[in-house]
Amino acid sequence: MSVRSEKVAEEIKHQLNTAMSKDLSEIPGLGLVTISKVFMAPDLKLAKIYLSFLGNKEPVDKCLEKISSRKKHIRFLLAKHIVLKYVPDLIFYHDDTIEYADKMQKIINEINKDETKD
């Protein structure tokens, strides 16, 4: 990524985290939503948004659908705070690195537990 697209990605991440905490908190069943990473297309017309969910009451797929259904509103909020020629189209993905790290830690703990028994 170029320096400009990295800066735009960081600003979008910051603004979306603010929007998620303030304006989109009324979506039922989501829990805490954080943007973990944003990847911008080179032409800055597309942003891939990676989300992590904590305390959600519904499956991740349903949570992503709820957020994707409000994409126009999210883009509107983004356009109010970021000045760009084009407000990028947003595509939302689930970031499962926290769950993956937790799974790996459990496996390592089991291996260590088995070694201490011997």
Image: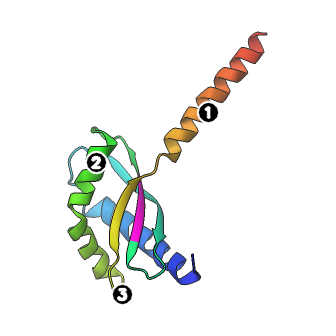
Q: Mark 3 falls on what kind of element?
A: loop
The image shows residue 68 at horizontal and vertical percentages of 26, 59
Tell me, yes or no, whether the highlighted magenta stretch contains residue 48: yes
Residue sitting at the far right: 118
Tell me, yes or no, whether the highlighted magenta stretch contains residue 74: no
Q: Which residue is mark 2?
A: 63
Q: Amino acid at mark 1?
A: Gln
Who's the residue at 38% across and 63% down the image? 17
Label placed on residue 105: 1
Label placed on residue 51: none
Who's the residue at 20% across and 59% down the image? 69
Who's the residue at 35% across and 89% down the image? 85
The image shows residue 7 at horizontal and vertical percentages of 52, 79
- Mark 1 vs 3, N-terminal side: 3
Numbered disc in front, either 2 or 3: 2
Out of 75 and 25, give the one closest to the viewer: 75
Label placed on residue 83: 3
Question: Label 2 to label 1, Cα distance in Å?
Answer: 26 Å
Q: Is residue 91 above or below residue 26?
A: below
Q: Is residue 74 above or below residue 8?
A: above
Q: Which residues are magenta?
A: 47-51
